[in-house]
Image: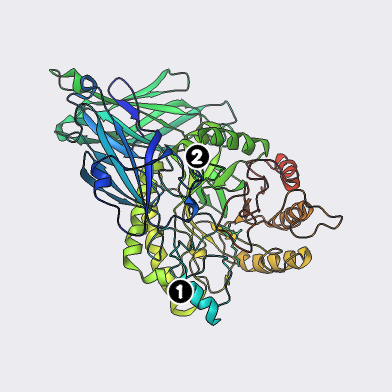
Amino acid sequence: MLYPQTNDARMVFSLDGVWNFRTVGETDYPSEWTTEALPEPIPMAVPGSYNDQNDMTDLYDVYGWVVYQRTFSLPERVIDGQRVVLRFDAATHAADVYLNGEKLGSHKGGFLPFEFDVTDNIKPGDNLLAVAIDNRINQSTLPIGNEGNVAFFGSDNAGIPSVEAGKRWAKPQNRPNFDFFNFAGLNRHVELYTTPRTYIADVAVTTKSITEGLNEGETGPAVIGYMVTLGGESTDERGDRVTVTIQDENGDTVATATGTRGEITLPAAHLWNPGAAYLYTAHVALAGPAEAKAESDEYDQTFGVRTVEVKDRKFLINGRPFYFKGFGKHEDSYFHGRGTDQLLNVKDVSLIHWLNANSFRTSHYPYAENMYDLCDREGIVIIDETPAVGMSWPQYTNKPLFEHHQQVIRDMIARDKNHPSVVMWSLANEPWYDQGGEKSENALKYFTPLYELAHEEDPQNRPVTIVCCQNDYTKDLVTRTMDVVCLNRYYGWYNLSGDLDAACYALNYELDWWEKIGKPVMFTEYGADTMEGVHGTHGKMWSEEYQRDYFARIDAEIDKRPWFIGEQLWNFADFVTIQGTMRVEGNRKGILTRDRQPKMAAHFLRGRWAAIPDFGYKG
Ligand SMILES: CCCCCC[C@@H]1NC[C@@H](O)[C@H](O)[C@H]1C(=O)O
């Protein structure tokens, strides 16, 4: 799915700004709220979660529907004869969309784009756009919501008559089976864009071969593959009117090709590398019929020349063994909630550089495209993750959920396939699947087809993984089948708490087991909750000294394992969760505070990572 672009053939109209907004709740929204002006609306900024934007009412407790509304008008002379598309970069978690009183359709899933062809719905003057959004999560959504009365890490005294009575009486609420606040709404950009009626619908670019061993700034022959998909009217005989021009970073043409698919040799290619990005542009042009130049289309698709491969328990980028240094993150900030904030993206990327990190995982959902674009140009490596978090054995026989999971994988790869920064797909975070017997078998039957689907859907055929929770690894049949074993481990925090000696012993006990499995292994989570300003001469849990010591001790152990290919800790920064006895204004495992100030561990890691090269750390 191409990101909207303004050029000689296309135009983008942003619908960001202040919309009208009303909460509805669990019942259905009134139909007149989608066909007439909202009564007594409050202002709501888009993009942005609605939860933190108004203190006259508690929008943290919304359970069910809200309705957004705005009007817009488009210049007739610009859209005349063009195709007009309404696109949502995301709407969390489910949306019904109406234009001028007509329902355009619905979308389920809160972290990937969807669009509607509104060519025949647009009218001169004001158009009324209404979007109803449902924030409810349950056992059949991704992420997973508990339908009982306790969330992940929620506390309870089950069985006590008064407590049970209180749980029955309590108003319905979302009970996330995951550890981040269920921020919702129009979290990302909303836009209208035009294309000709016959248009470029998709562009895929792959790297077929490179010259390995190039140093930064050196060039060598490379071969790329491309495929252009056309859409709209009379697309079949138009293939011969497609030209592809490859431009280097200076905008100079380095190669050209015609046709909707083929291979192109770049005689002196610059490689895209972590920390040394180089971006090319494939300028795709679809010539209109001679008699109608105005029907030509064009699209500029950036890409990087680089290969990714898992081989001999190494993670190779451009044939060299890469070592992941970084973290899991969240799209999470004051006031914006999970809303796209380009300034924060730029600041976070600067902090990734300041920390001498080179990568992050999009825990636990695909992030907004803007962040991937930034990482493409900044040479930061991404593990791209679906919103499948909080899963357990009941899900592995839930066929509608499996089909939704398949669609999410297709949509995530369709959106992110051209980003050189994306080097691996994560199918899920911490699915619980170590109960042994049929439950473990069902998990394997659920995830194996998804693993195969991700490989099939990706034209670049990147490695595929799943991120494994602290579990009984001997009964976990799934993790060991992935291309890379990604472990979330909390020795010294959730278990053997405060005892880093025992924690290191237990970690090595498990790593001895993984030694025999023959796959590359990395941490995708490890860490300790830390309150900035809490100190101690013998750093105890929650102190800044403990978080620093935790990483220093654990890292010393993984350094001893040549097949341990990376350390992504938990978390880049503190972030908001449900309220609960184990969370103080959220999860405090950040090495930065939520307002991006470094804790003591950040300084330790900055020094450690300065001494760890992107390539060849383990030989
Ligand atoms: C019993 C062990 C469970 C460890 C689970 C650790 C969790 N992994 C997923 C993340 O979203 C959580 O924030 C993290 C944690 O709680 O800080």
Query: Percent x, y for residue 551?
Result: 72, 53
Query: Percent x, y for residue 287?
Result: 22, 23
Is 294 situated above or below 19? above
Query: Percent x, y for residue 32?
Result: 24, 47
Q: Is residue 245 left or right of residue 176?
A: left
Marks 2 and 1 sit apart, C-alpha to C-alpha, by 48 Å
- Identify the coloring: rainbow
Query: Which residue is depicted at the point 33% across and 27% down?
Result: 12
Residue closer to the observer: 456 or 369:
369
Tag 1 secondary structure? helix
Residue type (three-letter) at the residue carrying disc 1: Arg
Residue type (three-letter) at the residue carrying disc 2: Ser
Q: Can residue 271 be seen from the camera position used here?
A: yes
Q: Can residue 456 be seen from the camera position used here?
A: no
Q: Give ligand 1's quarter of the image.
A: bottom right
Q: Earlier in the sequence, mark 2 or mark 1?
A: 1
Residue 121, labelled with which disc?
A: none
The residue under label 1 is 168
Residue closer to the observer: 599 or 277:
599
Q: Is residue 472 left or right of residue 478?
A: right
The residue under label 2 is 421
